[in-house]
Image (tube, rainbow, N blue to C red):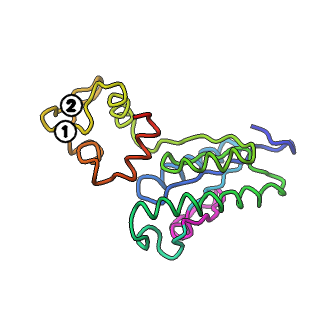
Amino acid sequence: MKNQGGGHGHVIVVTYPAQGHINPLLQFAKRLASKGLKATLATTHYTLKSINTTTIGVEPISDGYDGGGFELAPSLEAYLESFRAVGSKTLAELIIKFSGSDSPVNCVIYDSLLPWAHEAARQFGIIGIIFLTNSASVCSLYCRIHRGDLSFPVQKEKVPLLMPGLPPLELSEMPSFLAQPSDHSPYLALIMEKFGI
């Protein structure tokens, strides 16, 4: 991926600010940088101070709760809505910031919980690519639900669940919202939309 100035491409990697999301995308950004691309990790103001790296750039975007992240939000729904509204605006500002530099952004890779990042990239004619931080076995579960091979919510009576290439799976080894969807409905809505469920 070359940019118009003849240099290597510049990728912004946008992470959801939670355990299990930041590190996979941070490591991926470092890997891209090791291959010659300019990589910039975009994370919330609150999580910015926990990122320690010298091999990639790290830039803040806002979730609307800069002083404490989702702990300050009245609900998960309110947090996700604020992050969508404010995050897409500040991601656009970050893209604009780099547009006048010698390494304008030509790709945005975003966490699967942040579909609005794709729209932010598209408004600048930039490629947007989703990054799934969950395991292949979890993706397989979602696919089975989508195809109708597995009931949703997953019934206790149907476990252990047998899937090709995996040991029998108990409910405790699956994402909790597959058995109790109401406990995580805002996340569930994002995931179900992503997998067409």
Q: Which residue is mark 2?
A: 161
**Is residue 141 or residue 19 the one in the foreground?**
141
Q: Residues within 10 Å of mark 2 (few under 14, many from 20)?
A: some
Type of the residue with mark 2: Leu
Secondary structure under the numbered disc 1 in the rendered image: loop
Q: Examine the image and state in which quarter residue 62 appears.
A: bottom right
The residue positioned 50% from the left and 60% from the top of the image is 81
- Would you say 70 lies left or right of 59 here? left
Assign the C terminus to one quadrant of the image: top left
Q: Which residue is mark 1?
A: 170
**Residue 53: x and y, percent?**
59, 61
- Given residues 190 and 172, the one toward you in this image is 190
- Residue drawn at x 45%, y 45% as measured from the top left: 133
Answer whether labels 2 and 1 touch (C-beta < 8 Å).
yes
Q: Is residue 68 left or right of residue 117?
A: left
Q: Which residues are magenta?
A: 44-63
Specify few, some or many for label 1: CA neighbours under 10 Å numbering under 14, 14-19, or 20 or more. few
- In reply to whether residue 54 is colored magenta, the answer given is yes
Quadrant in the rendering for residue 36 = top right
